[in-house]
Image (spheres, rainbow, N blue to C red):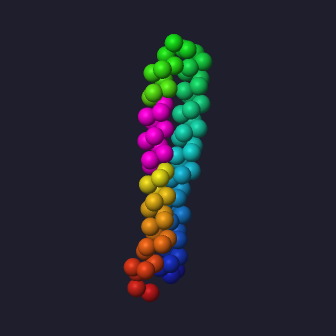
Amino acid sequence: MSVIGIIAISAAVAALTGVGAALGMSMATGRAVESIARQPEAAGKISSSLMFGLIMMETCAIYGLFVAILLIFVMPGQVPV
């Protein structure tokens, strides 16, 4: 397998963080909606905790995308072929 192929596979694995973040965000949002439906008086605390968690998950997805872009566009120029 060539070096470019290994870099492409690495970038694909790094981009998979977006899938994990999307699944995590959907599960967290669904659970938050269920919690608010059960206890409407706690909606403020639930919403603020949900936003903090969503921000952390989105940051992880953006870092994964950044690493994938770096691997695709920067690494091929750095590797002697």
Residue 33 in which image quadrant? top right
Q: In this view, does 56 lie above or below 1?
A: above
Magenta span: 50-60
Q: In this view, does 71 lie above or below 62?
A: below
Q: Which residue is drawn at 57% across and 43% down?
A: 23
- Residue 62 is inside the magenta segment: no
Name the dominant secondary structure of the magenta segment: helix
Residue 9, image x, y percentages: 52, 68
Q: Is residue 41 above or below residue 18?
A: above
Q: Which residue is drawn at 43% across and 34% down?
A: 52
Q: In which quarter of the image is the C terminus?
A: bottom left
Tally of marks:
0
Residue 30, image x, y percentages: 59, 30
Q: Residue at x 60, y 18 (%)?
A: 37
Q: Residue at x 44, y 62 (%)?
A: 67
Residue 26, image x, y percentages: 58, 38
* Side of 26 where 4 appears, left or right: left
- Residue 52 is inside the magenta segment: yes
